[in-house]
């Protein structure tokens, strides 16, 4: 048995042996560890699928960052979303969800939760009147939304949603992957559970895949219990990697946001671009509300190429330093668009999502300008 200092064992007083960990009898274990998994001998022995020192260290850090009582991490964003819904919902319950949510999340709701007997209903989470009407009509147990929707960048105000949910006893769940706790902390507005795909700007380099749910222990511990049954715990190596990245999150989020605003402004004046969407641009429909709630605009800008899908295809062919590919929140700038993306995201022709990285803003703007092509 060796001390596993790198994975956070030191802090948690744990001793590691393969995927079995033990801690001294007087060591406080997280509240979510299933009692069956804790040996009665001294030191207590448990199996890593239920949690391990590296993931506890990351969970403590992320809970502090969100201002949450506790947190639970999973192997991906989708893993934490599905575990959260399994913990909260049973057959016969209703889930009201935002039509602006990430399509894979919507697919999970419509294909899998619905098959298991959960009624799933979509609403326009950006419009509190519409949300109130749909809550009244379908009496959901859970409300799910993304404060900044991927990829439409529609803003749904956590304060409005928290107020409506609290008044009706509905559990509110926000997926804040696009903004991160560096820019918006929905728990402070009264949201019950905040989720993130840690694969995005929180890990930041495009090398780790992970997810987290944060909130009150009474809501989060049952998610950890589901994780123990279903699998999907975050691997120790990945937990350590994400924990390192979290230390630079505020710096990276501030720099990427500042550059993203400059990219959005530059694209707005380019004749090859039909329309730009970014929360801090003057024509963004929720600009004032967004500025009240968030510390900066985030690293994602979307636009529509004036030459439609063909223009985006030309961009992908011309791509050099700025690569075309999925994902966002990496330290390098990336673009995503084209016919398949338009279909998947239900976006009009010419749609491009730019994830602005940490390079020099002038260089990003120049390279995007070169990549945009002739524009006809
Ligand atoms: N939530 C949002 C808003 C996303 O954009 C994504 C992925 O793109 C996910 C969740 C899923 O995260 P992961 O890819 O880590 O499973």
Image (spheres, grey):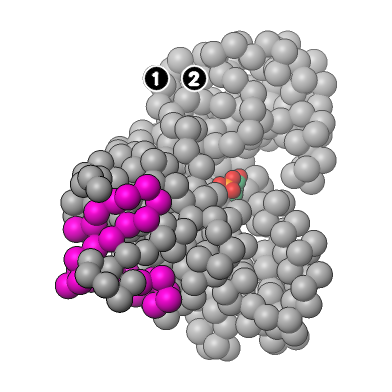
**Residue visible at 18% across and 51% down?**
10
Depth check: 318 or 231 in front? 231
Residue 86: image quadrant is bottom right
**Residue visible at 73% across and 81% down?**
91
Residue behind label 2 places its C-beta within 8 angstroms of ligand 1: no
Q: Is residue 28 left or right of residue 122?
A: left
Q: Quadrant of the C terminus?
A: top right
Task: Report whether residue 251 is seen.
Answer: yes
- Residue 271: x and y in percent read 68, 21
Residue 245: image quadrant is top left
**Which label was assigned to residue 166?**
none
- Residue 128: x and y in percent read 62, 73
- Residue 109: x and y in percent read 72, 64
Highlighted magenta segment, given as a residue range? 13-38
Say what secondary structure mark 2 lies in.
helix
Label 1: few (<14), some (14–19) or many (≥20) C-alpha neighbours in 10 Å? few
**Residue visible at 50% across and 84% down?**
166
Q: Is residue 244 left or right of residue 228?
A: left
**Which label was assigned to residue 360?**
1
Depth check: 320 or 74 in front? 74
| Residue contact at pointers 1 and 2, CB within 8 angstroms | yes
Q: Is residue 34 magenta?
A: yes
Q: Is residue 357 left or right of residue 129?
A: left
Task: Report whether residue 66 is seen.
Answer: no
Write down the residue under mark 2.
Answer: 364
**Residue visible at 59% across and 15% down?**
369
């Amino acid at each position: 048995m060796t001390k596993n200092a790198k994975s956070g064992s030191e802090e948690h007083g744990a001793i590691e042996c393969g995927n079995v960990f033990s801690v001294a009898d007087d060591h406080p274990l997280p509240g979510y560890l299933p009692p069956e998994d804790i040996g009665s001998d001294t030191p207590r022995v448990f199996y890593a699928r239920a949690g391990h020192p590296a993931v506890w260290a990351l969970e403590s850090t992320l809970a502090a960052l969100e201002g949450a009582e506790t947190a639970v991490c999973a192997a991906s964003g989708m893993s934490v979303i599905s575990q959260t819904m399994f913990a909260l919902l049973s057959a016969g319950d209703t889930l009201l969800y935002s039509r602006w949510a990430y399509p894979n999340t919507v697919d999970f709701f419509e294909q899998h939760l619905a098959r298991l007997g959960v009624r799933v209903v979509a609403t326009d989470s950006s419009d509190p009147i519409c949300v109130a009407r749909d809550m009244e009509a379908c009496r959901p147990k859970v409300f799910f939304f993304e404060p900044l929707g991927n990829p439409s960048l529609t803003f749904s105000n956590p304060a409005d949603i928290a107020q409506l949910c609290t008044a009706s006893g509905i559990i509110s769940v926000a997926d804040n992957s696009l903004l991160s706790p560096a820019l918006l902390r929905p728990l402070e507005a009264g949201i019950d559970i905040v989720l993130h795909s840690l694969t995005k700007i929180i890990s930041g380099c495009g090398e780790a895949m992970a997810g987290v749910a944060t909130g009150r222990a009474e809501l989060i511990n049952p998610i950890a219990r589901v994780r123990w049954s279903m699998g999907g715990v975050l691997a120790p190596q990945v937990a350590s990697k994400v924990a390192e990245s979290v230390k630079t999150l505020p710096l990276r989020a501030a720099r990427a946001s500042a550059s993203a605003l400059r990219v959005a402004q530059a694209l707005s004046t380019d004749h090859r671009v039909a329309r730009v969407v970014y929360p801090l641009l003057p024509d963004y429909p929720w600009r004032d509300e967004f500025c009240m709630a968030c510390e900066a605009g985030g690293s994602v800008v979307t636009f529509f190429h004036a030459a439609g899908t063909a223009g985006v295809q030309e961009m992908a062919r011309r791509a050099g330093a700025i690569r075309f590919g999925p994902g966002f929140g990496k330290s390098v700038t990336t673009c995503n668009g084209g016919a398949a993306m338009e279909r998947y995201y239900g976006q009009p022709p010419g749609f491009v999502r730019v994830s602005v990285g940490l390079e020099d803003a002038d260089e990003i703007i120049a390279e995007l300008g070169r990549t945009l092509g002739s524009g006809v």
